Amino acid sequence: MISNLDASSFYRRLNRVLFPSCPIKSEEMLFGRGKDMANIEAALYAPGRHVFIYGDRGVGKTSLAHTMAYKLQEATDPIVVGCEPDSTMASIIQDVITRGSQPATHHTESQLKVKLGIAGTGAEYQKSHKPAPAATPVTNVSSAVNALFALEQHHSPHPFVVIDEFDQITSVEERQKFGVLIKSMGDQGCKTKFIFTGIGDSLMSLIGGHKSSERQIHQTKLDNLCWDGREDIIKRAFGEFEIDIDKETRLKIAGLSDGYPHYVHLMCEKILQCAYAKQENVESVDRKLFLEGLSEAVNSVSETLKRDYVMATEGREDMYHHLLWAMADSADLQRHKSAIMASLHAICKHLDVAQLEKAQFDRRFNNLKKESFGEIVVPALGNRPMWYRFKENMLRGYVRMFAESNGVELDFYRHYTAMEPSVRTPTGKQRHYQPLTEVERLASQNRK
Ligand SMILES: Nc1ncnc2c1ncn2[C@@H]1O[C@H](COP(=O)(O)OP(=O)(O)OP(=O)(O)O)[C@@H](O)[C@H]1O
Ligand SMILES: [Mg+2]
């Protein structure tokens, strides 16, 4: 129980602060992205410039794009469209035009009442609703530019358009057409602004479409959420219910999440739900409550996210779990095989299970690279021998949560290698480079 809240008040408050499954669109809820927002805003004020936000799956690309678009769009809502494998430049712009012609409030009223985004003033002004002109179909770059000019007449003078998951478009040729479109829009003074999201490769094919479009696209690489940002989500969530959560537990959640905000939201949500389900009133998070919530969070991670882990471990000996936990140990995303073995050694010792001989370790480790094991581990550092990483970075957060919920506390701070990004080190914690300790070095040498 939490402060005698009834179910509807509890869930209303919970949904106000935690969004494990949907992108954020308000600045107050988007933590740790202040610098990116300022840079994007500056870029979008420049005539003819657009933005491409790229980064790993789940780092928060769509949330940043939505928040920027909602922040900057005046008078109405921004336009948000997604991409699909068979999308074309023409189909996407057509989609933009269709959506831009039917904002929710436009349907029936001839006058559109718009709330200005000035917090607390409640100021309103009336904007004449200009009905969208009969649509001319978009078929090529030139008709796309014309359609966007028309959009500026009836949607807003400066429409902000989010084109989400650009990498989904399979055709490189269609991606490249956006480079040409952007160049044309700039030349003709079109004021519509695009905010793209996607992975880095798709950005390259967009720019490849027209060399000079590189100058017209501000590129924002989004890293995993910084430690302060992770902690801010936690503080905001527990603060909403006036529940105390100590620094150590906050850092634990932040470290387990590996900088993927989805995991932070999920763990906080489950801990709060477990607290709410208790008979007694909960005022602070203790270790037992944390572990209960963590275990619920691990269970509710989506099937697609945990598929590879399940493939690598289900119906197999426990050692495969231990091997994967060893992979997720330390702050390094790319790990040398000897360091993985050192981590495994520590885990086996902690669990009091027998160590693997070098040959046994090699055989099992090689299995993790096989298709039947989800190819969960792949070579790293341009295939340099002995260096490995998880197939997908987001997996590491899941593996960390899984290990912790099974009583294995991994180290999130230690660097075995010297070149990992410092975003992973929380404020107040010194980033430290530690090669293998003597004991670990001996342990790994003995197994060679
Ligand atoms: N800066 C942030 N502060 C708080 N929560 C965030 C932040 N960024 C993202 N989130 C949350 O994290 C989750 C994932 O965010 P989002 O969907 O924006 O990521 P994405 O990079 O677009 O993911 P995908 O690659 O799967 O499309 C969402 O639940 C969102 O609410
Ligand atoms: Mg997204």
Image: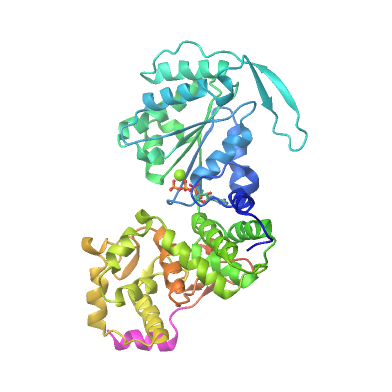
Q: In which quarter of the image is ligand 2?
A: top left
Q: Does residue 180 belong to the magenta stretch?
A: no
Image location of residue 394, percent across then percent down:
42, 58
Image location of residue 180, percent across then percent down:
41, 26
Indicate whether 248 appears above or below 12. Answer: below
Residue found at the very far top of the displayed protein: 134
Q: Residue sitting at 43 percent across and 81 percent down? A: 436
Q: Residue sitting at 52 percent across and 55 percent down? A: 261
Quarter of the figure that contains the C terminus? bottom left
- Quarter of the figure with residue 425: bottom right
Overall secondary structure of the magenta section: helix
Q: Does residue 437 belong to the magenta stretch?
A: yes
Foreground residue among 213 and 295: 295
Q: On the rendered structure, is 448 left or right of 59?
A: left
- In this view of the protein, can residue 269 be seen by the observer? yes
Indicate whether 67 appears above or below 124. Answer: below
Q: What stretch is highlighted in magenta?
A: 435-448
Residue found at the very far right of the displayed protein: 121
Q: Residue sitting at 27 percent across and 67 percent down? A: 368
Image location of residue 165, percent across then percent down:
42, 40
Foreground residue among 225 and 114: 114
